[in-house]
Amino acid sequence: MPATSENVRATGRRKEASASVWLQPGTGKVVINGRDIEDYFHREVHRITIRQPLVLIEKLEGFDIKATVKGGGETGQAGAIRHGIARALVEFDPDLRAPIKKAGFLTRDARCKERKKYGQPGARKRFQYSKR
């Protein structure tokens, strides 16, 4: 899709997931990786997560969303798409920045897997201690 004043693109990330989101005025249709949102995310909590920024600004039926997401698991992908939608909404209308930022949707969730430490079997796990 070519970038126009009505068509906005933004990138969202969470954990290992990365999403490109295209936002345009429409009827509320959400397509993820060429599939409908109900086909892509089977858990209702993920569909609710994705729609949170739209519910916040009370424009649930006001935008068509096309997202391409890769990496991570289902929850990480849903969080990445939500982050992308929030950033696209702010780019579409800068007046929406204050309520979206207050809700915490513009903040990138930086939590990620902790690295394995040398001399131990995992990030936090330790070898069993034996006195003898």
Image (tube, rainbow, N blue to C red):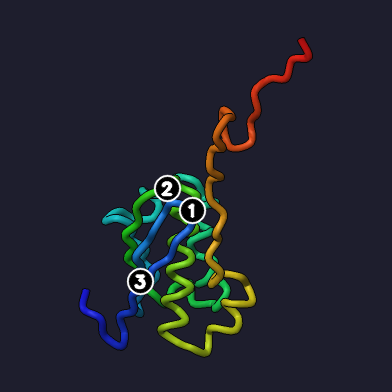
Q: Which quarter of the rendering shows the N terminus?
A: bottom left
Residue 23 vertical position relative to residue 66 in the rendered view, above or below: below
Q: Which residue shows up at 35% across the image and 80% down it?
A: 25
* Count of numbered marks: 3
Counting residues from the N terminus, which is met first, the one under dot 2 or under dot 1?
1
| Residue 64 - label | 3
Is 132 placed above or below 115 here? above
**Left/right of residue 127 with respect to residue 16 in the rendered view:** right
Q: Give the percent coordinates (x, y) of residue 104.
A: 61, 70
The structure residue drawn at horizontal position 45% and vertical position 75%, both measured from the top left corner, is: 87
Q: Nearer the viewer, residue 97 or 129?
A: 129
Q: Which residue is mark 2?
A: 72
54 horizontally vs 4: left or right: right
Could you tell me residue 3's position as x and y percent? Answer: 25, 81
CA gap between label 3 and label 1 equals 25 Å
Circles 2, 1 touching at the beta carbon (< 8 Å): yes
Whole-percent x and y of residue 26? 34, 76
Q: Amino acid at mark 2?
A: Gly
Q: Nearer the viewer, residue 43 or 121?
A: 121
- Residue at (56% x, 28% y) in the render: 121
Residue at 49% across, 77% down: 59
Above or below, comparing residue 111 to residue 118 in the picture = below
Question: Which mark is drawn over residue 15?
Answer: 1
Q: In which image quadrant can residue 89 be found?
A: bottom left
**First of labels 3, 1 by sequence position:** 1
Task: Look at the numbered disc 3 and give the secondary structure of its residue.
Answer: strand
Q: CA distance from mark 2 to mark 3?
A: 24 Å
* Secondary structure state at the residue bearing disc 1: loop
